[in-house]
Image (cartoon, rainbow, N blue to C red):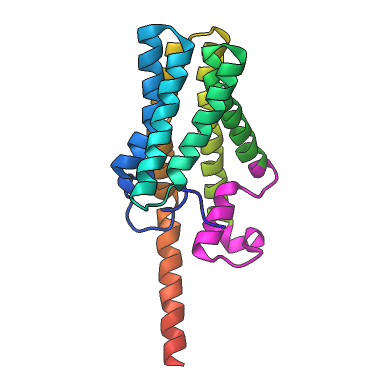
């Protein structure tokens, strides 16, 4: 099971904003459908052309990657979110429902992160252990208590980031403020995600350095034996 993109650099010595965001293409593929949705809706106030335009952008991103024989995982992930939003909006005839799936998803993520801390199995700790090869039962190791606390704090941070999206977007959805919803989604999307990934890396970098040092010491000892 690979670590999620927001956690993939937690054990790295340096943080790469480009890698976190998926490069320029990743930013475009993630942001373009929502941006086009807002632009077309504000210009036309018509749901059908708006949904067609947003869908077309997501489909084109997938087709270009297929033609270039590149991985379409990120493009397909973006297309899935757009497709669900388009189906909900088209089925109900309400433009704000294009964003409903995202609000529900963020609510579920906030709950999952919070519950993992309350269960003393923080998600940040789980993925960090997987990335660094911490042994089974590390959660009960007294010497690793500071690391567990840090992972718990970072997990609460992620729960707060997802919760912030819901807190901002849910009232706009209830008010049927479609354009404002689109702007809020863009503002609280990639920028907030990248900031959270950087904070996770920054919060764990000292422990990662220690883990690397310990691993190197162990390898050196083994080679001398």
Which residue shows up at 33% across the image and 50% down it? 68
Residue 21 visible within the image: no
Q: Is residue 220 above or below residue 89?
A: below
Q: Is residue 202 magenta?
A: no
Q: Is residue 185 above or below residue 151?
A: above
**Magenta: main secondary structure:** helix
Q: Quadrant of residue 45?
A: top left
Which residue shows up at 64% across the image and 38% down it? 112
Q: Quadrant of residue 59?
A: top left
Q: Is residue 43 above or below residue 134?
A: above
Q: Quadrant of the N terminus?
A: bottom right
Residue extending furthest right?
119
Residue extending furthest left?
24
The image position of residue 91, as x and y in percent, is 61, 17
Which residue shows up at 60% across the image and 40% down it? 113
**Is 205 on the left-hand or right-hand side of 149?**
left
**Is 58 on the left-hand or right-hand side of 4?**
left
The image position of residue 173, as x and y in percent, is 55, 13
Residue extending furthest bottom?
225
The one of 86 and 225 positioned closer to us in this rendering: 86
Number of marks present in the image shown: 0
Residue 88 visible within the image: yes
The image position of residue 120, as x and y in percent, is 67, 48
**Is 220 on the left-hand or right-hand side of 93?**
left
Write down the region rendered in magenta. 116-144
Q: Is residue 141 magenta?
A: yes
The image position of residue 83, as x and y in percent, is 53, 30
Q: Is residue 215 above or below residue 222?
A: above
The one of 38 and 52 positioned closer to us in this rendering: 52
């Amino acid at each position: 099971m690979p670590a999620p993109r927001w956690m993939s650099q937690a054990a790295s010595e340096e943080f790469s904003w480009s890698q976190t965001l998926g490069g320029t293409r990743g930013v475009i593929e993630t942001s373009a459908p929502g941006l086009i949705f807002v632009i077309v809706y504000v210009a036309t106030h018509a749901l059908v052309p708006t949904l067609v335009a947003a869908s077309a952008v997501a489909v084109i991103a997938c087709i270009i990657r297929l033609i270039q024989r590149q991985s379409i995982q990120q493009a397909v992930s973006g297309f899935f979110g757009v497709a669900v939003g388009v189906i909900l909006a088209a089925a109900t005839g309400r433009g704000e429902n294009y964003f409903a799936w995202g609000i529900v998803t963020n609510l579920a993520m906030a709950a999952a992160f919070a519950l993992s801390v309350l269960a003393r199995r923080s998600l940040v700790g789980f993925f960090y252990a997987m990335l660094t090869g911490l042994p089974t039962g590390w959660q009960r190791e007294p010497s690793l208590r500071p690391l567990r606390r840090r992972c718990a704090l970072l997990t609460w941070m992620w729960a707060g980031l997802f919760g912030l999206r819901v807190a901002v977007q849910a009232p706009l959805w209830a008010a049927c403020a479609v354009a404002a919803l689109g702007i809020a989604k863009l503002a609280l999307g990639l920028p907030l995600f990248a900031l959270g990934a950087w904070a996770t890396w920054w919060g764990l970098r000292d422990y990662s350095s220690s883990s690397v040092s310990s691993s190197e010491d162990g390898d050196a000892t083994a080679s001398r034996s």
